Image: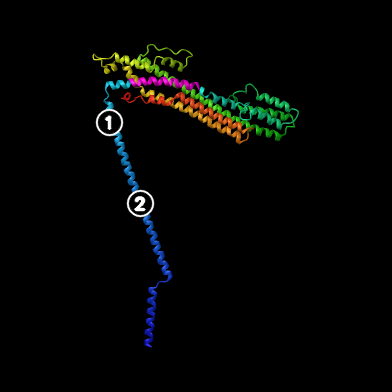
Amino acid sequence: MRKITLIFICLVAISVSVQAQDPTPQQLAQQLKSLQDLRRADSVRIISLNDSLKRRIQMLDNMQKRIDDHELDLQKADAGIKQFGKRLEVSDENRYRVIKSNLVYSSELFEMLNERLNTLDALNQLQAYQQILTDLNNPANENLGFSYNKKVLQLLESNIQGKKKSRLLEITSMVLNNPVLKGVASMTPILNIGSSVFNVVSSFAAQDDKISTSSLQNIKGELDKYTLYYGKLNDTNATFQRNLDSYRINVSNLHTKIKDFVVKNLKESGFGGNLPQQTAGMTTGAYLTTLFATYNRDAVERYFSNLERANVDSKGAIKYEALLKSNTSLINMNKRTEEVIDIYKDFENTYRQYIAMINQNNDIMQEILQVAITEKLTDSASKVTEQINRLKTEKDKGIASIEVAININKMKSTVERLDSFFPAL
């Protein structure tokens, strides 16, 4: 019995030992999951460390770039200081040459500005473009394949019945063809024309029961559609005209500013003797043209040549210090060089605004004309397309002519020759 017990105990011990050595599938799955979790955690830490490393490298690159930029700024500043120092050491001769150059190129610039302002003031380059606008705004014009007047009469013809129809058409035609309303439509309130026509129709409807309410409503709906379309055309044209008027005022003000500046210089220098007076009726541009007949680059250069010949020593060398001291007006005029540059900037800004105004008007007109096709207002889409292309072509030709006449690059090259450094000292 004791042997049997001992054998049983041994078997139990062996069984327990085997179970301890061979884990169950559940245990194996749990161990695998733990290992996978650890691996994922390690991967996240590695990615985080890589991102942190990249950020540190980027920070170092940015710091290096700032250091390089700072060194470059220091080099530029050092070069500027050295250049400034050189210019502070300017001699009387160099100062005189700068003054001479500034006044010579200023006279050339002002003469060019006067010519360009006269060109812009004429506005002849846009004559064809503006004529197209005028025609398209005319309610009787059929360049778009329809006209406001014709559509109104067709509308009444198709919706009105009865004995008084012919009389209604006659009165409506008289309203539409009134000499006061013909011509430039932007000068006439198209909305008022539409209201007048509908009032006439309503009056007839009140006296004739054959004009139904539905016909009246249909007339109003269609009439409003064309009236609103021409209203957009008229508003755009009126805005363009207002912008042109405003532009002309700017040109006139700039012309006056140039005249005042030139006259001040001439009076201060005594150049050219007595100044001619601006007579009544003479435009500023015409008056400046008269002044520039004697006050121009060639004349200014001769003026300085005479000053140089009058200020030489026994050896024939120019006495620059004496020349400047005896002609302090030259120094005073030179101090206004920055004003000359500002006047040019005013001109360029006015010029750029003028070109932008034309482009803006053309863009709006292109959109409005396209509506005549998309909303089926026209009887001929090809005619509308023709006007769209024609308007753009004339706009491009007008701007090209203006750019050639102005030659802004030539003016810029003259302005760049002006030195505003010395006057500031």
Q: Position of residue 341 (x, y in %)?
A: 38, 24
Q: Which residue is mark 1?
A: 82
Q: Which residue is painted at 56% across and 33% down in the image?
A: 367
Q: Quadrant of the C terminus?
A: top left
Taking 5 as reference, is 156 above or below it? above
Q: Quadrant of the N terminus?
A: bottom left
Q: Secondary structure at mark 1?
A: helix
Which residue of the protein is positioned furthest toward the left in this rendering?
Answer: 314
Q: Which residue is painted at 43% across and 21% down in the image?
A: 113
Amino acid type assigned to the residue bearing label 2 in the image: Ser
Q: Which residue is painted at 38% across and 58% down in the image?
A: 43
Magenta highlight on residue 118: yes
Label 2: how many residues lie within 10 Å, few (<14), some (14-19) or many (20+)?
Answer: few
Q: Position of residue 259 (x, y in %)?
A: 42, 18
Taking 292 as reference, is 341 above or below it? below
Q: Nearer the viewer, mark 1 or mark 2?
A: 1
Q: Which residue is mark 2?
A: 52
Viewer-side residue, 71 vs 416: 416
What segment carries the magenta color? Answer: 100-123
Amino acid type assigned to the residue bearing label 1 in the image: Lys
Viewer-side residue, 144 vs 137: 144
Taking 50 as reference, is 77 above or below it? above
**Residue 227 shown left or right of residue 270 in the figure:** right
Of the two numbered discs 1 and 2 on the same chain, state the one appearing first in sequence. Answer: 2
Q: Position of residue 44 (x, y in %)?
A: 38, 56
Q: Secondary structure at mark 2?
A: helix
Mark yes or no: residue 397 visible.
yes
Quarter of the figure with residue 191: top right
Q: Main secondary structure of the magenta part?
A: helix
